[in-house]
Amino acid sequence: MNDPKLYTLMATWLLIFVRIIGYFVQAPIFGSHHVPKQVLAGFAALLAIVLYPIVPVPPEMFGIGAELHYTHYAALVPLIFSQFVVGLTIGYISFIIMAAVQFGAELLDVQMGLSVAASFDPGQGSVNMIRRMMFYIAMILYLLMNGHVKQLEALRYSFDVIPLTGVTITPRLIEMLAEKTGLIFTIGLQISAPVVAALFITQVGLGLLARVAPQMNVFMLSFPLNIMIGLSLLSASLLLFSERLGQLYDDQLYWMVRTIKLLAAGGAGHV
């Protein structure tokens, strides 16, 4: 353990591992609570070992390895933080479409009245039904399109573009992150718009019916009617939803590549 080169190799593997962990925190499938954290950490360590031989080692790492040899571990702390931020940013971009699907499904739960019913479910707590169903549909489609494989390829590409000792936070990167975050609401509204519009028309019709026939209990009638209309239109639009989701997944891969280039040192000139 007295060889500075050995410390350089260990520090290089650690930085690769930290970037992968940061990515897994936000990434679809990998960041899901369905995957045990111990399994996720073990897979990240294994993936770091697999990627280690093909990751270029910057010349600065040898100087850091020499400092570690003399127990100057403070030199490694900023690099660990920067690599975690890189992985977290890439993972966040890869999760935007999933977040948009959940937001749109949440709107459907509220409009159909199922969000209130979920709060009275002693078995599942406050997890809404439509949100869970749409999330699983999006996840299955993501797996069928090999989205998880493409995301890992993008992560591997990040090691070719973003050095382990350098990352750039530019105004263009912040602007892009803000723009893609806004797409969560835009895409979510697009997903839920047909059903929400139909339910709005239904509510207007029930309001007119209440004025024409005051003796009818329109309030109680609206609950099953909203659920019936909402589920019917949602079932009819699932095919269009799947096609649109496939297009969004392709666009998301482009967003990830652009984010990786913006994160690279001097990456603004490559985008």
Image (spheres, rainbow, N blue to C red):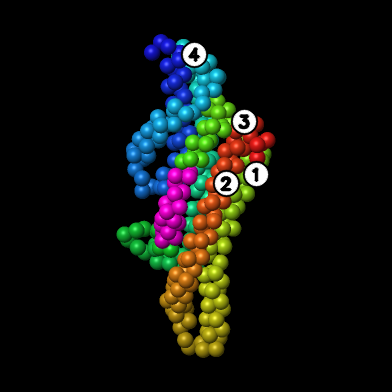
Q: Which residues are magenta?
A: 132-151
Which kind of residue does numbered mark 2 sit on? Tyr
- Residue ID at (55%, 86%): 211
**Which residue bears the numbered disc 4?**
66
The picture places residue 121, in percent across and down from the top left corner, at 35, 63
Question: In the rendered structure, are the residues bearing label 4 and label 2 in contact, judged by CB atoms less than 8 Å apart?
Answer: no
* Relative vertical location of residue 266 with respect to residue 232 in this rendering, above or below: above
Q: Is residue 47 placed above or below 197 in the rendered structure?
A: above
Which sits earlier in the primary sequence, circle 3 or circle 1? 1
Mark 4, Cα crowd under 10 Å, few <14 / some 14-19 / many 20+, is some
Question: Mark 1 or mark 2, which is nearer the start of the sequence?
Answer: 1
State the SS at label 1. Answer: helix
> Which image quarter holds the C terminus?
top right
Q: Nearer the viewer, mark 4 or mark 2?
A: 2
Q: Disc 1, disc 4: CB below 8 Å?
A: no
Kindly check if marks 3 and 1 are in contact, taking CB atoms under 8 A apart as contact: no
Q: Can residue 103 be seen?
A: no
Q: Amino acid at mark 1?
A: Glu
For marks 1 and 4, give the CA distance: 38 Å
The residue type indicated by label 3 comes to Ala
Q: Amino acid at mark 4?
A: Ala
Q: Position of residue 23 (x, y in %)?
A: 47, 39
Residue 265 bears which disc, if any?
A: 3
Q: Nearer the viewer, residue 207 or 62?
A: 62
Q: Which mark is residue 254?
A: 2
**Closer to the camera: disc 3 or disc 1?**
3
Q: Which mark is residue 175?
A: 1
